Image: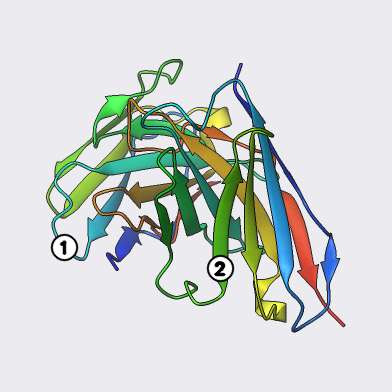
Amino acid sequence: QVTLKESGPALVKPTQTLTLTCTFSGFSLTSSGMRVSWIRQPPGKALEWLARIDWDDDKFYSTSLKTRLTISKDTSKNQVVLTMTNIAPMDTAMYYCARTHSSGWYLDSWGQGTLVTVSS
Amino acid sequence: DIQMTQSPSSLSASVGDRVAITCRASQSISRYLNWYQQKPGKAPKVLISVASSLQSGVPSRFSASGSGTDFTLTISSLQPEDFATYYCQQSYNTLWTFGQGTKVEVK
């Protein structure tokens, strides 16, 4: 059974750096074709794809956020970490991590999400 | 980046109605188009991948078609559990993008 769970601070102050962790089970990010993405959703708004890390350590970032994002993986802990610098109130959102299986180019398993509020 | 535009942004429908949602890409994405359903307070769930491939467990009243830049998700007979927001998402290039969503509401 594939599971993913996001964790991180619920409240962050503006200008700080946000660090989110996705802890997963039921698959290995060392297996060819496996990928993990981060997606966010501001309250009442649409989904926004943020970043992806692949089994071979290739990394991809949303063009609009790439200067602020870093994605990394720790395969020994089955974790993917996303950091976002210079946080602002508009970054308030539910943050999800999701898996892409080697058999397809879609997000087949999602975490429950973690809500991050940016406020002073 | 490839922009994905859905229409309509919202629609009102009744149980039993046939509903169609369209998604247009800003450039050709072949068939690298996926559809997700999201209910309030829940994570999205993939319904359809590669433009028209129904995921396991998804009711057959859901179907989709399209290629290139124009895609359609159809619900043949809307059921109470189908009231939700639907998103398209392209995976044609390395940077993925979602549409802005279509909310299907009770009429």
Q: Position of residue B83 (x, y in %)?
A: 55, 39
In the drawing, what numbered circle is on residue B7?
Answer: none
Q: Is residue B93 visible?
A: yes
Q: Position of residue A97 (x, y in %)?
A: 59, 45
Q: Chain of mark 1?
A: B
Q: Looking at the image, which is closer to me, A59 or A5?
A: A59
Q: Residue at x 29, y 68 (%)?
A: B1
Q: Looking at the image, which is closer to me, A110 or A15?
A: A15
Q: Amino acid at mark 1?
A: Gln
Q: Where B49 falls versus A60 (above or below)?
A: above
Relative placement, left or right, of A19 versus B28 is right
* Residue density around tag 1, few if under 14, some if 14–19, many if 20 or more, within 10 Å: some
Q: Position of residue A39 (x, y in %)?
A: 55, 54
Q: Amino acid at mark 2?
A: Leu
On the image, which quarter does residue B31 sit in?
A: top left
Q: Secondary structure at mark 2?
A: strand
Residue topped by disc 2: A69
Residue topped by disc 1: B27
